[in-house]
Every structure is written in structure tokens, then in C-alpha cells.
């Protein structure tokens, strides 16, 4: 059996209070990692999750990626440089509409949080990994932008997700001779509050069922399924996937026509 001391022990998960982020917090905690997760709004939810999981192995920190210096503020609070960074925090089209009524501001926020904020935080965390010559970086992008193009989707949203996938590939290329591993996961339609807000909440029961039935597999992806992929990527067997951009969409990425309008 692999020596536990050779395994990464700390993981930083951004956007860890709901959806895929929360599922990853729970999954990594269950596997014995020290989990540090971030939130932007909803301090009570973050505190509740920490208390539920209990012990000193779970801690939460505020991270507002709309701010250019957010990564500096987070680094001052972290106990140490994490072994694994999972860039999960992000905005969607429906989310930014709740933050502003200005369409131009929607675009700015999507690019700032999803692309620029992710870049700055990754670059800052990467410094510690380079010093140790070890670590793992996992990006959460989207099948829209990261894998394929879907007419009618927000330009800025798609651009930002494409930028994340590019960042994963570029860093992997630069780190190919190091012991740092980089991966990108591109989920499809996932059973999260963000997807519900953008796609399902405004529909009636029959129309909602029709939309879900039109998805590949006739169902939504569960956040725990994406968390399971992230857990695998954290382990040694995933080394051979260095640089991979993983289509985790139940086939929506290879057959977008399956998405029935």
C-alpha cells in the first residue's frame, strides 16, 4: 500500500458551499484530506458546513474573486500552501443578473471571476507548488466553452469557460517536466443551484421534465459524480492524464444535438 505520507493531505476548494463545490468538500473530507474551502456570500452556510463536518480538518475562508487583490487576501489567511488547488468558484449568466442590471457589467463579472480571478489565484498558489516541486491543480470549466459551442449561450460566459480550459492546457504544457499535475473537468448539465436558476426554475413541471429528458442519458449529472472525478485526479493513477481536459457531460460535448430545445 502506498505510504500515506506520500499522498497530498491538504486541498483548497474555491466556491465550496453549494453544488459541485460542496460535493467536493464532502468527498475530500470523507477521504481524510484537510479541506480548506472558500465562499463569497453566505457565511452562515460556510460556518454550518464546517460545523457539520467537524474538527480542525475543515476550515472556510472568504474569497471575493470580483476583486483584483482577492488572492492576496486569501493567501494571508491560509495556514499553508495547499497540496491541491481546485478552482471551482465561478459565476453563471443567471448569477450575474442578480448582481447587476447592466449587461456590460454582467460580461465584466463573468470574465473577471471565471477567468482573471482564477488565473491570479492559480498563479499565487503555484509558487508554493513550484518550491516543493509537487502539487495538483484542478480546474472546473464547463462543456459550454471548455468543450463545445452552443448557439444562444452568453458570449462572455462561454469565453470565460474557454479561458479556463486554455489555462489548464497551457499550465500543463509548462509543467510537463515537473511533478505538478494539472487537469480540467468540464461538466455538463449538473444538478446544482446555478443550473436550476439559469435553466429550470422558470419552467413548469412538464416543461422541466421535457428539458431533462432531452439531455444525454435523460437526466442531470449529480455533483457527487463530478466530485468523484476530482478525487480520482487527486491520486497517483491520474498522473498519466496530466493536461487532460475531461468532458464530463454524459455525451453532451460530443453530441450537442442531443440537447433538445
Image (tube, grey):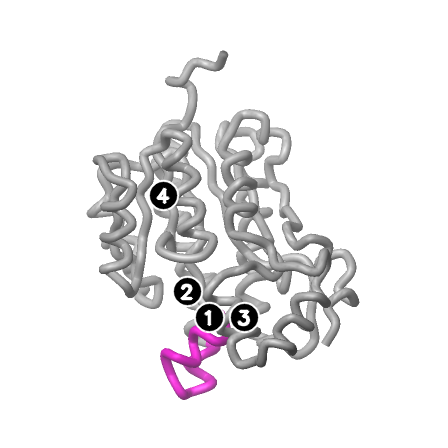
Inter-mark Cα distance, 4 to 2: 17 Å
Q: Circle 1 sits on which residue?
A: 110
Nearer the observer, disc 4 or disc 1? 4
* Quadrant location, the C terminus: bottom right
The span picked out in magenta is: 92-107
Crowd band around label 4 with a 10 angstrom C-alpha radius: few (<14), some (14–19), many (20+): many
Inter-mark Cα distance, 1 to 2: 6 Å
Instruction: Examine the rendering and report whether any part of residue 82 can be seen.
Output: yes
- Is tag 4's residue or tag 2's residue first in the polypeptide sequence? 4
**Tag of residue 157:** 3
Residue placed most toward the observer, 33 or 137: 33
Q: Circle 2 sits on which residue?
A: 113
Asked if the residue under mark 3 is in contact with the one under mark 1, i.e. CB atoms within 8 Å, the reply is yes
Q: Where is residue 110? Give x, y as percent.
A: 46, 70
**Left or right relative to 186: residue 32:** left
Inter-mark Cα distance, 1 to 3: 6 Å
Asked if the residue under mark 2 is in contact with the one under mark 1, i.e. CB atoms within 8 Å, the reply is yes
Q: Circle 4 sits on which residue?
A: 12
Asked if the residue under mark 1 is in contact with the one under mark 4, i.e. CB atoms within 8 Å, the reply is no
Tell me: residue 244, above or below residue 62: above
Amino acid at each position: 500500500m502506498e505510504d500515506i505520507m506520500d499522498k497530498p493531505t491538504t486541498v483548497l476548494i474555491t466556491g465550496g458551499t453549494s453544488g459541485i463545490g460542496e460535493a467536493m468538500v464532502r468527498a475530500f473530507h470523507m477521504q481524510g484530506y484537510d479541506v480548506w474551502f472558500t465562499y463569497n456570500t453566505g457565511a452562515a452556510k460556510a460556518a454550518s458546513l464546517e460545523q457539520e463536518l467537524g474538527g480542525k480538518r475543515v476550515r472556510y475562508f472568504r474569497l471575493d474573486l470580483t476583486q483584483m487583490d482577492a488572492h492576496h487576501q486569501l493567501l494571508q489567511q491560509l495556514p499553508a500552501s495547499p497540496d491541491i488547488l481546485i478552482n471551482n468558484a465561478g459565476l453563471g449568466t443567471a448569477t450575474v443578473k442578480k448582481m447587476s442590471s447592466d449587461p456590460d457589467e454582467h460580461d465584466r463579472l463573468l470574465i473577471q471571476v471565471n477567468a482573471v480571478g482564477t488565473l491570479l489565484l492559480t498563479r499565487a498558489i503555484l509558487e508554493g507548488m513550484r518550491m516543493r516541486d509537487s502539487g495538483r491543480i484542478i480546474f472546473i470549466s464547463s462543456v459550454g466553452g471548455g468543450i463545445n459551442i452552443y448557439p444562444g449561450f452568453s458570449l462572455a460566459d462561454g469565453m470565460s469557460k474557454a479561458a479556463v480550459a486554455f489555462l489548464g492546457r497551457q499550465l500543463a504544457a509548462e509543467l510537463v517536466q515537473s511533478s505538478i499535475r494539472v487537469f480540467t473537468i468540464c461538466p455538463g448539465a449538473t444538478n446544482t443551484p446555478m443550473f436550476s436558476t439559469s435553466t429550470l426554475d422558470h419552467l413548469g413541471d412538464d416543461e422541466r421534465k421535457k428539458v431533462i429528458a432531452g439531455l444525454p442519458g435523460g437526466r442531470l449529472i449529480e455533483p457527487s459524480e463530478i466530485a468523484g472525478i476530482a478525487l480520482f485526479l487527486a491520486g497517483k493513477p491520474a498522473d498519466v492524464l496530466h493536461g487532460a481536459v475531461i468532458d464530463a457531460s454524459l455525451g453532451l460535448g460530443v453530441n450537442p444535438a442531443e440537447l433538445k430545445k
